[in-house]
Image (cartoon, rainbow, N blue to C red):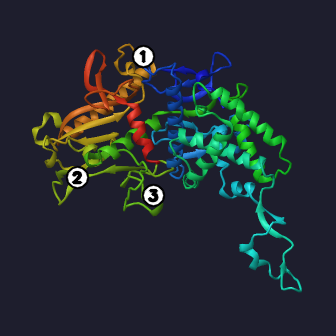
Amino acid sequence: MFDFSGLKLVTAGTDSFVGIRKSSYGDDFEFCLPNGFEEFPTGDFDEIKKLFFGMYRAFRKFEQDNVNTGRLKFNEANFQKDQDQTTLSSGGVSLQTGEGETCVLYSKIKMIEQILEAYDDLAINSIQKKIRRSEEIDYSQIHRYLDKAIYLDNNVIYVDYMDLPRPVVRYESTDLVNLYCYILDEIVQQLQEDVAENIKARLQDIQFLSQRFRDAYLTINQSIFDKDTFAETLNLLKETLDNIDKNTYYKDSDYWQLYEAIETFLYGELNPNQTDGEFWGMQGFSLLWEDMCNTFFFKKSYSDILYADSDIFLKNYHNPLRKDTERGRVGNYSTHDGSKSWSQWAYRTTSDVHYPKRAGCFEWNELFCIELDLKVGVLVYTNEGYNDFNQRDRSRTQFRRFPKPDLILKSKRNPSKVRIIDYKYHPINFYTNQNLLGNPAKIVEEAVIKQLTYEFAIQQTHDVSANWFFIPHFYTSLPKPDPLGEIDGKVRRNGQNTGIDIFRANFTLIQTVYLEENL
C-alpha cells in the first residue's frame, strides 16, 4: 500500500486529470487535486487520506451509475498490462458526452480492489472448517450414522468415525482469514461502509474476525491508515503473512485467493516503470463534477427544479416514464435527435406560460427555444407586435433549436423569478482574466454567449434573479451564511461586466451528498 505522506499534491494543474499518476519531472507520484483546491492543506496526512477515499468512492459510483447507459465504453482487455502492482481497469473506461467531450476513467487500484473482490462467504467459511473424517463423536449427529455403526452383543452401538468440520491446519489457516478480515475491515471503515451488498450483510462477522487479529497481534493504537503507525503496522502484517505461509502445508484455491489479495495489498506499489500514463483517477473530471452537482440539487432542492440537463441515477427514485431497469433515473423526456448513438434524456417540468392557440402550458424546455422565421422580415426588437410571447405565430418557423442549460431553479419567495446555474470546471481566474488568448478565450466567449442566451429566453416570461457559473472550491472552514458557497466576482469579457456571477461551490458538501446515495 502506498504512503499518503509520500504523495506530491498538485493544485491548479494544466489539464483536467484528477487522481494519482507518475510525476512528469521524476519517478515520484503526484496526487492531482480538482480545480479550486488551492487552499487544501497539503501537509495534512488525514485530509489527504480523506480526500483519496472520497474520490475513490466517487469514481466507483460514477462508473456504476453510467455502466448501463451507453455512455461508457470499456477499452479492450489487451490494453491491460500484466503486472503485480497497480493496474488499470482493462486500461480504463472511456466516455463521451453529447457535446463530443471525451474522458477516461481509471477507477481501480488493484491493491484495494483485490481485497474487496476476494470476499466470499463460502471461501472464508471453507478455509476455516473443512469436512474431514474425524475420530471425535458428535452425539447430536449419531442418528445419521446408524447404518454405518457396529452393533455389539450388549446392545451398544459403536461408531468408528464421523465426517465433521475441522480445521485443515488448525492455527495458520484461521489466522489467514483473521488477517484478511482485519485488512478488509480497515478498508471498509475508510470507505464508510460504501461496499458491495455481500460485504455489508456480513460486517459483524468481518469485524469479529478482525478484532481477533487485533487482539492477537496489534496494540490498540495501531492501524493501516494511521499517520503515526501505518508503517509499523504494515511491516507487522507482512511478517505475519510470511509466518502463516511458511507454516501452512495444505493450500487450496480458497487459501490462495485470500493470500494473493493480502500480498497484493501489502506489497503492491504504484509502478513508476508503467508507460500507460494515468494510474488511478479521471481525465475529464468535469463530467463527474456535473453529476455531483445535479445529485446535490435533486437531493436538496428537488421541488424547486424547473429544468435540468441531467439523467442521473437516484436511489429510491421512481420514474414512471422509464423502463424497469431505468426507473431510478431522473430524465423524463428524450432529447435524442438521431445524431448520436445513445439516448439523451433531461428533466423538465411544465411552466405557467399558456399555449397561445391550444389548451395547456409550455414545457420548460420549450421556453428556451430559438427560432428563425424566414417569412417574417422584421426583428422582434423593432416590432412591438412581436414582443408579446403569447402572440407569436410559431407555426411558420423553419429552423428551431433548443438550448439546454444545466439547471433552472425557481425562487422560493417569488415563483416568477428563477436562477440559472451552469456547472463549470475551470479555475476562477479563467473567467476573470481579461488577457486570455486562443482556445481558452474562445471557450469563455462561447460559455458567456450560451449563458446570456438562456437568460434572454427566460426573460420573455420570467424574471431572472441570478445567473451563475458554478465552480468547485475547497473551503478550509464552512462558508457563511450559505454553507453551499459564495459569489466571488463576475465574469468579465473585453472589459465589460457580463452580468454572470461566479459562484464558488463547497466541493466537500456536494461530494458528501453525492456519496450518500450509495449508503
Q: Earlier in the sequence, mark 3 or mark 1?
A: 3
Q: Nearer the viewer, mark 3 or mark 1?
A: 3
The residue wearing badge 2 is: 362
Which residue does the image show at 25% across and 20% down from the upper left? Answer: 497
Q: Position of residue 381 (x, y in %)?
A: 16, 34
Which quarter of the picture shows residue 326? bottom left
Mark 3 residue crowding within 10 angstroms, few (<14) / some (14–19) / many (20+) = some
Q: Earlier in the sequence, mark 1 or mark 2?
A: 2
Q: Is mark 3 in CB contact (under 8 Å) with mark 1? A: no
Q: Is mark 1 in CB contact (under 8 Å) with mark 2? A: no
The residue wearing badge 3 is: 326
Mark 1 residue crowding within 10 angstroms, few (<14) / some (14–19) / many (20+) = few
Mark 2 residue crowding within 10 angstroms, few (<14) / some (14–19) / many (20+) = some
Q: From what the image shows, is residue 194 above or below residue 228?
A: below
The residue sitting at the front extreme is 154
Residue 60 lies left or right of residue 301; in this view the side is right
Distance from Cα at disc 1 to Cα at disc 2? 41 Å
Label 1 SS = loop
Q: Position of residue 82 (x, y in %)?
A: 76, 38
Amino acid found under the numbered disc labelled 2: Phe
Label 3 SS = helix
Distance from Cα at disc 3 to Cα at disc 2? 26 Å
Q: Position of residue 409 (x, y in %)?
A: 26, 42
Decide if residue 91 is in sight here: no
Residue 299 lies left or right of residue 164; in this view the side is left
